[in-house]
Image (cartoon, coloured by chain):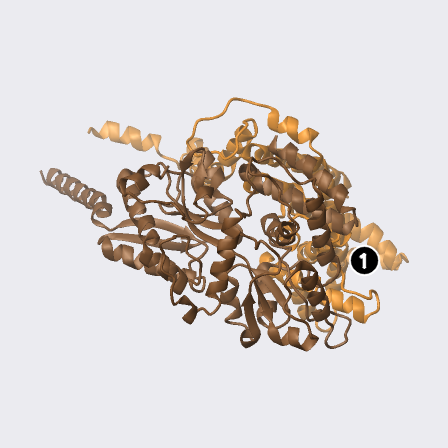
């Protein structure tokens, strides 16, 4: 009898523990996973945190787990998570990497959600990039235009004016590239380009000169347009810049930005995020922001928000609520005031932002100029093959520089290889 | 439950019985075997299966694609693959030879009695103790084309009149990777050889000295033959390390410029995470495994013949 009682008691205890354990998750907060490379970015990171705080205030019992993944390994992380069937509920991707996920059918079409809430996306900068196979699969979070920051002290010391054209830019960069202590090593550069951050970044740096020469990788119908006189001119300019020693070579973006911010570089063409670095640099007071001498300015879509297609419906609603919150005019304004970015919403009130970010009008001007010309870093028709395409272009360009090849021949090779990649 | 049944069960599970002792052994190693199967064998089977499917990004639990040899057909007709094989082979030969030369030399040195021997041994092992990624970042700075220490030294010593483009010249990039790998790899050879040297009885050397053998003869006819078992295994392990190493190349050159440092492991990564061709990446991985197995068998076979 005793044994029976003991067994019954043990069974009851086990059942109670199991029941409590199963009730646990249901009673706990709903957690949405949100992975980003911008968690601690100056300005932008704070903006994300403010959006999360507001969302959690509006949705008691729902928490957003905001986790950082380094940008350099971000695409790998997201690929692994999607492949393992464990994507985060809030999907944050660069605008040149969401296509592979959308093409696999892993991103939720957002048109029904937009329609349900009556959200008009007309005029939303870069939103067209988020259309994949006729469906809206993401919301463009950032669309930007490149600016040129210059060190006034260095330009004044060399006696050169702020350049307005490519030729003036090249002359100014040559005049300000110097070996200041005579040890045979250049320690002040005219400009700086990142050439160590991978093919995508390499192409972005090149594109400044290529667009100014009137060239681009593809036309609006997705046809490859590399073998053109304009592209030959663009490649020639890039070759000139890289071979003339006016830029440090084999440097990562953060190193180049740091050099500029610390007064070791005269001019730097970059996106709005450069401001975060220059504000912390030792040459902060000498740095001025201006419209780039290369026109139209390079720009384009930067990053997007999306949601996975196979999460439960109640989670989809929560994710959509978060995305919608970031799209409100209030948060679009703070994207500028707090993040220092150009908000894509046409309804964003950005008046007075220049009081805290003096060069904000320049950012807006270049963003609009790039947007009007339809400039983007990802060529139409090559979205799915962008990594392969950019690696091919980088390698052929490196070959041109290392082996001193004729840009006209290189353009022909690139054209043929790009057509082969596209199939 | 009757006492007879209970006794029968006890008898069956009596692992102390001599006839049941092998069962105890199997039970004890079962967790380790299962663990190895879960983390090595199962992914290996998945990779082999994936290599025979034309798949961009696979999804765990997703439906399999039809059997296809297209990944291997592409691989064998791809210039990229043969170039990666050639770069891997060059790197394996250079780094293994360099590591063995430096490692054996330092081991011979540290095997002698001299003041500061403990410090020398510690210094010898230091590169091995430094985490690989930290070592590579330090080397990346030293090889920096604009401000790197090696470029500065080359100018100061008059070897060059300008900074050396370590990472944007195909030849320089290969040697930058090889030097870093030798620096990271030689302590392992050194430690293994030192252990091997200390196991050689000193009587052999004393007898050889009495017979009038020179230093070189003692090294050739005593040290080397007795060290070969250790050296053989060390060579195989070093070779496999060079084959699979990823972080040094990825951080220093990323496989460039012009794929001059793109080894099979870098190619596997690029195919998977850059181009999202997981089927092709799996095929490169499987072939790398086959090459490693063949190389190891050849090396171990040679070692076994060389003992004594």
| As drawn, A31 above or below A272 | above
Q: Which x, y percent locates residue B246?
A: 61, 48
Vertical position of residue A150 compared to residue A371: above or below: below
Chain A, chosen colour in render:
brown
Q: Nearer the viewer, residue A238 or A72?
A: A238
**Left/right of residue A297 with respect to residue A319 in the rendered view:** right
At a point 75% along the width and 51% down the height, the residue shown is: A401
Nearest the viewer among B52 and A111 is A111
Q: Position of residue A387 (x, y in %)?
A: 58, 42
Q: Residues within 10 Å of mark 1 (few under 14, many from 20)?
A: some
Outermost residue toward the right? B212
Tell me which residue sits at (44%, 27%) in the image: B63
**How far across and down, in percent of the image, does residue A18 sit?**
21, 42
**A356 lies left or right of A219:** left
Residue at the spot 65% in from the left edge and 53% down from the top edge: A209
Residue position marked by numbered label 1 in the rendering: B205
Which chain is tinted orange?
Answer: B
Report helix, strand or loop for mark 1.
helix
Quadrant that contains the C terminus of chain B: top right
B292 vs B3, left or right, is: right
- The relative height of residue B252 versus residue A274 in the rendered view (above or below) is above
Quarter-of-image position of residue A102: top left
Q: Position of residue A248 (x, y in %)?
A: 68, 62
Q: Is residue A250 visible?
A: yes
Q: Is residue B259 visible?
A: no
User: Chain ID for label 1?
Assistant: B
For the point 13% across and 39% down, which residue is it? A8
How many dots with numbers? 1
The quadrant the N terminus of chain B occupies is: top left
Q: Is residue B170 left or right of residue A334?
A: right
């Amino acid at each position: 009898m005793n044994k029976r009682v003991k067994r019954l008691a043990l069974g009851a205890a086990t059942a109670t523990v199991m029941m409590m354990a199963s009730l646990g998750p249901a009673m706990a907060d709903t957690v949405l996973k949100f992975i980003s490379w911008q968690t601690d970015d100056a300005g932008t990171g704070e903006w994300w945190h403010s959006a999360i705080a507001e969302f959690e205030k509006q949705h008691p019992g729902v928490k957003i787990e905001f986790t950082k993944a380094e940008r350099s390994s971000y695409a790998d992380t997201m690929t692994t998570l999607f492949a393992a069937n464990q994507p985060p509920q809030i999907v944050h991707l660069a605008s040149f990497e969401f296509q592979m996920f959308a093409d696999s059918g892993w991103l939720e079409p957002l048109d029904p959600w937009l329609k349900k809430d009556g959200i008009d996306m007309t005029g939303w900068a870069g939103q067209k990039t988020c259309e994949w196979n006729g469906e809206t699969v993401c919301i463009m979070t950032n669309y930007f235009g490149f600016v040129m920051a210059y060190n006034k002290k260095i330009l004044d010391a060399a006696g050169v004016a702020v350049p307005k054209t490519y030729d003036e830019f090249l002359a100014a960069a040559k005049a300000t590239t110097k070996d200041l202590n005579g040890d045979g090593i250049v320690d002040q550069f005219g400009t700086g380009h990142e050439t160590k951050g991978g093919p995508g970044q390499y192409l972005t740096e090149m594109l400044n000169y290529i667009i100014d020469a009137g060239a681009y990788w593809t036309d609006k119908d997705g046809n490859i347009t590399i073998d053109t006189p304009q592209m030959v001119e663009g490649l020639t300019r890039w070759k000139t810049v890289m071979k003339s020693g006016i830029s440090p070579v084999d440097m990562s973006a953060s190193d180049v930005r740091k050099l500029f911010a610390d007064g070791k570089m005269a001019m730097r063409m970059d996106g709005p995020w450069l401001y975060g670095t220059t504000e912390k640099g030792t040459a902060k007071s000498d740095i001025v922001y201006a419209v780039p001498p290369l026109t139209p300015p390079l720009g384009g879509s930067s990053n997007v928000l999306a949601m996975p297609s196979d999460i439960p419906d109640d989670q989809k609603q929560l994710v959509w609520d978060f995305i919608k919150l970031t799209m409100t005019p209030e948060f679009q304004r703070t994207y500028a005031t707090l993040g220092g970015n150009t908000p894509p919403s046409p309804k964003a009130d950005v008046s007075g932002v220049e009081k805290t970010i003096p060069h904000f009008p320049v950012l807006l001007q270049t963003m609009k100029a790039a947007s009007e010309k339809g400039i983007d870093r990802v060529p139409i028709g090559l979205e799915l093959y962008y990594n392969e395409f950019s690696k091919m272009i980088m390698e052929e360009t490196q070959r041109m520089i290392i082996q001193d090849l004729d840009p006209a021949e290189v353009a022909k090779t690139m054209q043929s290889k790009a057509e082969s990649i596209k199939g | 439950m009757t006492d007879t049944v209970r006794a029968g069960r006890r008898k069956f599970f009596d692992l102390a019985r001599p006839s049941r002792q092998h069962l105890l052994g199997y039970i004890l190693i079962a967790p380790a075997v299962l663990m190895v199967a879960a983390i090595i064998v199962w992914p290996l089977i998945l990779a082999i299966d994936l290599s025979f499917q034309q798949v961009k990004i696979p999804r765990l639990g997703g439906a399999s694609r039809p059997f296809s040899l297209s990944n291997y057909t592409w691989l064998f007709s791809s210039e990229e693959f043969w170039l990666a094989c050639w770069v891997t082979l060059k790197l394996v030969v250079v780094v293994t030879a360099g590591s063995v030369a430096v490692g054996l030399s330092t081991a011979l040195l540290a095997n002698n009695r001299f003041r500061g021997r403990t410090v020398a041994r510690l210094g010898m092992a230091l590169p091995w103790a430094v985490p690989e990624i930290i070592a590579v970042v330090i080397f990346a700075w030293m090889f920096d084309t604009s401000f790197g220490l090696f470029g500065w030294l080359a100018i100061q010593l008059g070897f060059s009149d300008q900074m050396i483009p370590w990472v944007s010249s195909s030849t320089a990039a290969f040697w930058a990777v090889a030097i870093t790998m030798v620096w990271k790899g030689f302590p392992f050879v050194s430690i293994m050889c030192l252990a091997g040297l200390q196991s050689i009885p000193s009587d052999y050397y004393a007898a050889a000295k009495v017979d009038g053998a020179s230093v070189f003869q003692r090294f050739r006819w005593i040290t080397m033959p007795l060290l070969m078992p250790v050296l053989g295994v060390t060579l195989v392990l070093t070779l496999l390390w060079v084959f699979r190493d990823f972080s040094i190349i990825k951080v220093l050159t990323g496989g460039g410029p012009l794929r001059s440092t793109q080894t099979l492991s870098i190619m596997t990564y690029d195919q998977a995470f850059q181009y999202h061709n997981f089927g092709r990446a799996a095929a490169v991985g499987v072939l790398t495994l086959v090459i490693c197995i063949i190389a190891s068998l050849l090396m171990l076979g040679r070692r076994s013949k060389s003992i004594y």
